[in-house]
Image (spheres, grey):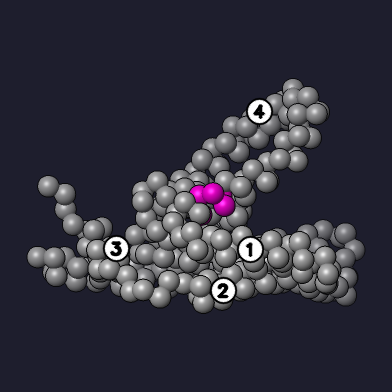
Amino acid sequence: MSTSTSAGSSARFAAFDRTTSLWGPITLALGLLISLAAALYAAFGTGVGVTPLELATAVGAVLATFGIIAVIEPVSYFPILGRSAMYQAFLIGNIANKLLPAAIVAQANLGEKPGTRRAELIAGSAIIGAVLVHITTLILFVGVLGTWLVGMLPAPLIATARAYILPAIFGAVLLQSVMAMKSRRTTLVAIAVAAVIVFVVVPLAPGLTYFATALAVILTIAASWFARARTPQSPEAGTGEAGRSTRISEPSH
């Protein structure tokens, strides 16, 4: 019974992967074309006087500054989000401060470690929920009440919120990541590597500022690999693909 259930789950996951591999790139390409069309129209179709050389210079400056993020983010987010949720996240945006926290919180609350098929489905569902909440709050608090609400708040409160909102978000993401991973060794390695990069490497070599995140990610992966436990994991503790697939599809009695 469990073998047939696992085979059925594998077939459904294979069909899901084929659909994702087809429509994921298509939707991302359409989003890219629409975004580029709007930007190019604003630059050359509205009479603002932007020249091709100016556009090329601006694009080159942005790529030189933020191009490394195009490599860092997929490598950093894929182990948590999985393939299908990655397509969702990069099409929607605001990954680090909205979608990734939603996925991590959902996985932690449902007791699922990142990297499994079930965790991928949970991440995709969490992203959908985060987007619905975000759109609703934008319509209500920005579109309807935004100007009035901000005007009612005292200036010192707004300044304080701006100073602490982003650290609070990343602090919550860090804590949820630690709780979801449940790996003390990896957590200590990540903290040590990040501290060395921020407080030692960057001050000694300021030119590496824009590569600090990439260095931290790569070195953390390498150090965690060498510092991993060498003892084999017991079958009871392991949660492989087949086990997760079976747990998804098994009917409850």
Name the residue that disc number 4 marks. Answer: 145
- What is the count of numbered marks? 4
In the picture, measured across the screen, residue 96 lies left or right of residue 80, that is right
Percent across and percent down for residue 1 are 9, 65
Name the residue that disc number 3 marks. Answer: 237
Amino acid at the residue labelled 1: Ala
Q: Are marks 2 and 3 in contact (CB under 8 Å)?
A: no
Residue 61 falls in image quadrant: bottom right
Percent across and percent down for residue 24 are 47, 68
**What's drawn in magenta, residue-wise?**
173-177
Q: Residues within 10 Å of mark 3 (few under 14, many from 20)?
A: few
Percent across and percent down for residue 169 are 62, 45
Q: Residues within 10 Å of mark 1 (few under 14, many from 20)?
A: few
First in sequence: mark 4 vs mark 2: 4
Q: Are marks 1 and 2 in contact (CB under 8 Å)?
A: yes
First in sequence: mark 2 vs mark 3: 2
Residue 192, numbered label? 1
Residue 223, numbered label? 2
Query: What SS does tag 4 mark?
Result: loop
Q: Does the stretch in magenta take in 175?
A: yes
Residue 40 falls in image quadrant: bottom right
Q: Residues within 10 Å of mark 4 (few under 14, many from 20)?
A: some
Query: What SS does tag 2 mark?
Result: helix
